[in-house]
Image (cartoon, grey):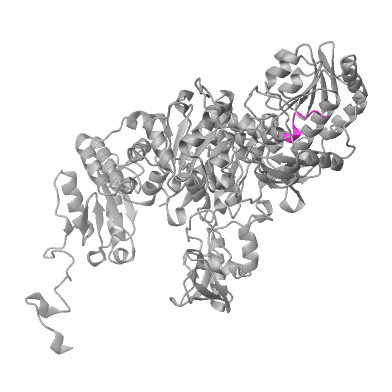
Amino acid sequence: MADRNPAPDTPELRARWSAFAWTPENRTTADWHIAKYPEGRQRSAVMPLLDLAQRQVGAETDTQGWLPLPVIEYVAQYLGMPVIRVLEVASFYFMYNLKPVGKFHVQVCGTTPCMLRGSDDIIAACKKRGMEKGHVSADGLWTLTEVECMGNCATAPMVQINDDNYEDLTPERLDAVLDALAAGQQPKAGTQEPGRHTSEPSGGPTTLKEMVTENHDYRGEW
Amino acid sequence: MPKVTVDGQEIEVPAGATVLQACELAGKEIPRFCYHERLSIAGNCRMCLVEVKPGPPKPQASCALPAADGQEIRTDSAMVKKAREGVMEFLLINHPLDCPICDQGGECDLQDQAVAYGRGGSRYHENKRAVTEKYMGPLIKTIMTRCIHCTRCVRFSEEIAGVDEIGALFRGEDMQITTYLEQAAAHELSANVIDLCPVGALTSRPYAFEARPWELKKTLSIDVSDAVGANITLHSRGREVMRALPRINDDVNEEWLSDKGRYQVDGLGKRRLDRVWVRRDGKLQPAEWTEAFGMIAGALEGNASSIAAVAGDLLDAETMFAAKALVNACGSQLTEARQTGMTYDVSNLAAVNFNSTFAGIETADAILIVGSNIRWEAALLNVRLRKAVKAGAKVFVVGPEWDTTFPATFLGSDLKILNRVPKELGDVMKSAKRPAVIVGAAALAKGALPAALKLVDKFGLVKDDWNGFNVLHISAARMASLMLDFTVPGGMADIAKAAPKVLLSLGADEMDYAPYAGSLKVYIGHHGDKGAHHADIILPGASYAEKDGTYVNTEGRVQFAEKAVFAPGDAREDWTILRALADALDVTVGFDSFGALQGKMIAAVPALGEEGLADYGALPKPDSAAKAEGEITAHPVKDFYLTNPIARASEVMQRCSDELLHGADVKEAAE
């Protein structure tokens, strides 16, 4: 959280982003989001619109995307709301990047369950590949961020890279994922444990075993 | 009306009241930081915890809990005491221990409540949070490490001022209150967040490190920076007014004050006229009172009645009455207060009064503003209009566009619109239950008053319990001058035509002195401003802080202000100068003391003797032939911060004008 200040308001930033406007498709999407809310409550669409703007910036810069101040101002003006209110939202939620990020934003969960399952090794593996917390790597591909719980404790440790989670990681599995991403492939999202589908108990169920094959009626056993 | 029990005492509370309000009704003090009567409920400081049954077995935030029938509320139980101590300990975790150097010291809610409700000490030994200072303009000084995140300032700027510029960025421990990109808070009421801040995070920049609250003498006074007549307290130390703070008066200013009323007071000590000056060989040179009086008497020799008086915008009623008595005693009727040359009809004062009252205009449901930039001419009225709009009122404006803080429809600036009302306006006004028209100074100057009066019948502005016809003046002295009949029918043109031998200018700094080249111009006032530059004789007078006086605001509300400090140097209270001048001119004005003067004034105009709204009777019959002509090209207030001689002398106001209105670079003092 400490480094969540918006990117400085420089003339270069203004020159690069002042002309920001929705692409035709995004305009349609933005209006569709706004139309979801009743008359007079259009500002409620601020969160999907910020996300959309971040994705559009990402598409323009070939990164995950971020929110330069002129883009935040554009969203505020599009919704007719004070820009400070939009900045409040953008600075509150971690999913909005206030600074430029790389093509792949590697967000490693470091909260207790992941830490117990080896997230320190995951972070070390990331750093070994040249990533640095809060910085874009020299090749423009990677940004490393340590985040709090992502809700994948059953498949810890995990990283979130852009829109996908990669779980049950070891440093080797993470390397495989990152190598695939760097090579332009789309590795399988979700758990990386062979034989595991989602977050079911690893090594087979330990409770409600009869339910695996049929809808077993336990009531007689209570 | 729910019945609740507070600490064993059963009371009935109004429907919709909160538990906190119920406790207050029962006479219990509930500590609080984020809760404020005039702002929305946030419920984030947790200081107002009480025990409520029935309910969950834990302390409840009383500010956000509705009072319900049969509730048993305890504010004195062990649980409540422990909860308050706990909350206070948490609030103090990140609060710096800098009370000795904090300007809020002595009037700090956190300090007071920590003493009253906190534990003796802290158990926190880790590092404290520190937050960088935020720039919020020339009036607000920030020490953000002291902030306890009550968000009162955020809610004030959003809800009351209507200028969304303060926000809370980031979250949790990193939450920071700031303006967007640390721009200055640039609206007319910005400094009210200083009063609202319960800690020393937002303090007054001009008043920084000046004085402690307990060494100040508090004097009840009236703000003269506009015609609202906001109730203020002047805080003085020795001979200096240190600051002005608003007093609560729900009928006038609620508990707010415009930045000008609050911060022009440093002008009271600058550019003061503190001795007599007379013009010799084209140059103003120091002189004695007797010499100046002799010159005036000499100028009137042979034509004793060739004297006229013009009143400025900041005058109290007593000064104007004394001047009128003097001029009349000399045998002249030439007195005029509308110094910029306005000539509207004053035979019926109801037609030039703000009849709806400020509290009443909140209930209006359709409002037409003709020629007034309300934000600059009466910032506190704008707060009321905003409340009306929030309650559903529609607002139309005739005149140049200005930045409203509420949705409003601008109908152009051509006054002909009053003769032929467009359908969109007419439909709304005629169907409104409480329609209101506000005629501003720009419209008065264009002579639009008779045409506006025709709207009374057309829109049905006057109903059983409603009078929607309003004139908004911009001069604090205006209504009192009209009540005292300090006018001539042709206005300033009549005075100029009479070419008086002696022109008494009572702090008239906005008038045109060009037509009076042949007159002996005597300026009786307190600041070396435009009037003093043109004067042949300067007699140093007292400002509003240095004399007792009666003021009448634009609603016709009579209010008394008290003397806070003595005028500097040789300056005297204005009435004494006029009394001495009467002796020099060998005429009798009939008073020898301020009490006698006031008594005589009240005998002449009884309404001035009673605090409260004066009764001006019914509106006059409109002149059916009246037509409004012309276009309102500009509002009279060109620069909100520099409208009167005190404000123009004030460094703070000059800096506000430079930075906030004219975009000059931020001047950071090298403190």
Q: Is residue B494 left or right of residue B327?
A: left
Q: Tell me residue B361's x, y (percent).
A: 53, 44
Residue at the image position 18 percent from the left and 47 percent from the top: A181
Residue at the image position 31 percent from the left and 29 percent from the top: A19
Task: Give the prevailing secondary structure in the magenta stretch.
Answer: loop
Q: Which range is magenta? A: B267-274
| Residue A34 seen in render | yes
Nearest the camera: B285 or B87?
B285
Q: Tell me residue B142's x, y (percent).
A: 57, 46
Q: Is residue A6 left or right of residue B149?
A: left
Does the magenta-highlighted stretch encompass residue B273? yes
Q: Tell me residue B143's x, y (percent).
A: 58, 48
Nearest the camera: B53 or B46?
B53
- Residue B664 vs B431, above or below: the answer is above
Residue at the image position 34 percent from the left and 44 percent from the top: A135
| Residue B189 seen in render | no
Residue B575's image quarter?
top right
Q: Tell me residue B124's x, y (percent).
A: 55, 65
Q: Quadrant of the C terminus of chain A?
A: bottom left
Nearest the camera: B404 or B591?
B591
Residue A20's image quarter?
top left
Residue at the image position 27 percent from the left and 57 percent from the top: A122
